[in-house]
Structure formats: C-alpha cells, structure tokens
Amino acid sequence: MPLYNRLKEHRVKINVNQFEMGQLVGVSRQTISLIERGDYSPSITLALKIAKILGVTVEDIFSYEEDQQDEQ
C-alpha cells in the first residue's frame, strides 16, 4: 500500500533541514529521511505533528493510492 508524501517540498518551504525537522517533531534526521524517501510510514501522531509544524493538513503532505491488486 503506497503512501506518497510531499514532506520534503513543505519542509523546504519553511527553510528547515532534515535534522531541524526531526528536532521539531521529536524524531531523528534519519526518520525524516526515511519518510521523505517513502521507506517509512509515520504514525498518525507523528503525521499530525509534522502537519502542525508545517502549518498544513495531513492530507496536504501524505496521500494514499491503492494498487490495482488491492482492488481485486
């Protein structure tokens, strides 16, 4: 189940690096990197924290698209 995100785009808009973003939401730089690459799906709590820091909704950052296999 692919979870796509625009975290990097929004993070760059507020001019913070991955390390700073991690500090703001209470995770490591590596976690922010994994989320941006799509290798880690954040918890609801973390997604909400990220959205609040960025001043956007969770839906502005994260989107889910079903695979065709999921529909069968």
Image (cartoon, rainbow, N blue to C red):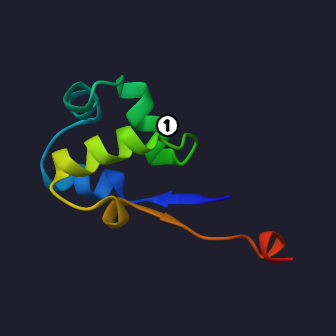
69 sits to left or right of 1: right
Query: Which quadrant of the rendered structure holds the C terminus?
Result: bottom right
Residue reaching furthest to the front: 45
Q: What residue lies at 73% left-to-right and 70% top-to-bottom?
A: 67
Where in the figure is residue 22, as x and y percent of width and height? 28, 29
21 sits to left or right of 15: right
Q: What residue lies at 37% left-to-right and 46% top-to-bottom?
A: 47
- Is the residue 63 above or below the residue 7 in the image? below
Count of numbered tags? 1
Where in the figure is residue 12, as x and y percent of width and height? 21, 51
Where in the figure is residue 69, as x and y percent of width and height? 83, 71
69 sits to left or right of 4: right
Q: Residues within 10 Å of mark 1 (few under 14, many from 20)?
A: some
41 sits to left or right of 50: right
- Is the residue 17 above or below the residue 15 in the image? above
Q: What residue lies at 43% left-to-right and 45% top-to-bottom?
A: 44
Q: Amino acid at mark 1?
A: Leu
Q: Nearer the viewer, residue 32 or 41?
A: 41
Where in the figure is residue 53, as x and y percent of width and height? 17, 45
Q: Secondary structure at mark 1?
A: helix
- Is the residue 31 above or below the residue 70 in the image? above
Q: What residue lies at 68% left-to-right and 58% top-to-bottom?
A: 1
Q: Nearer the viewer, residue 66 or 17?
A: 66
Q: List the residue tagged with mark 1.
A: 34
